Image: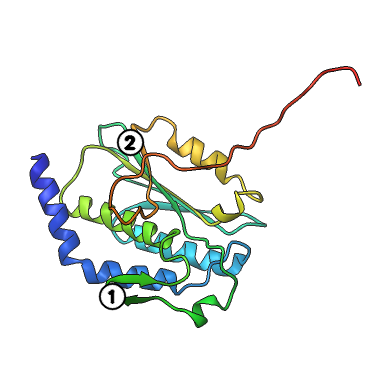
Amino acid sequence: MEHQVQDKAFDFIEQNREKLLAFWEELVNMESGSRDKENVDLAAERVAAELESFGVETEILSFEKAGNSVAGILGKDRPGTPVVLMGHYDTVFPAGTVEKRPFRIEDGKAYGPGVLDMKGGVALLIFAAKALEAAGYADRPIRFVLAGDEETGHCNSSMAKVFEERSRGCVAAFNCETGDPNNKIVVGRKGVVQCEMAVKGIA
């Protein structure tokens, strides 16, 4: 049964490759620099709509000084322990970048602002979930957490806590940023830790 689901999922990806590429292109061509709240919010709505198109229960997480984020769940009544798919659709690029260098594919490579970091990953995780749904996967609930302010470190939102809360109790968490050219799964990356330190002493 497991192999049947896998084969059907792979078949779905092959049959819907052009739709995946079209969605990737659409996302890349949407301005969504982290500090451009208006456009990030539009990207959030588009991502939520795509998730809802195959049955994901979604919610927009709204913030006053940060781009809105999206959370969702597919198959909440499934018996297994959930997995969570994570990502972000904000970029480091200022408004106007898309006009100068929109999405394009050249010699088998895709180019454009945020094409890898990480709109490619957002398209990937959505279509992977679509493929599993089409293949009849029903083992575990699938959670989604997609941020609109990752590039600024969630400094004006509570998304860091949201990621922690929505990942709690999951059997696995996948941050679906596009990988390296060798196509291997990335199991570790550099990161940032924020902490507070209290020191007692005599001056």
Q: Quarter of the image holding residue 173?
A: top left
Residue 95 locus on image (x, y percent): 59, 74
* Residue drawn at the location 59% of the way across and 68% of the way down: 38
Task: Give me the C-alpha separation between circle 1 and circle 2.
Answer: 39 Å
Q: Residues within 10 Å of mark 2 (few under 14, many from 20)?
A: many
Report helix, strand or loop for mark 1. loop
Q: Residue at x 15, y 51 (%)?
A: 135
Disc 1 + disc 2, Cβ < 8 Å: no
**Picture colour scheme:** rainbow
Label 1 sits on what residue type?
Asp
Q: Earlier in the sequence, mark 1 or mark 2?
A: 2
Q: Which residue is mark 2?
A: 82
Say left or right for 112 vs 69.
Answer: left
Vertical side of 167 occupied by 26: above or below:
below
- The disc at residue 107 is 1
Looking at numbered disc 2 in the image, what kind of residue is underneath it? Pro
Residue at image point 67% right, 57% down: 65
x and y, in percent, of residue 146 in the image: 46, 52
Q: Is residue 89 above or below residue 39?
A: above
Front-most of residues 50 and 14: 14
Residue 40 lies in quadrant: bottom right
The residue at 44%/51% (across/down) is: 87
Of tags 1 and 2, which is closer to the observer? Answer: 1
Above or below 47: residue 112: below
> Which residue extends farthest bottom?
99
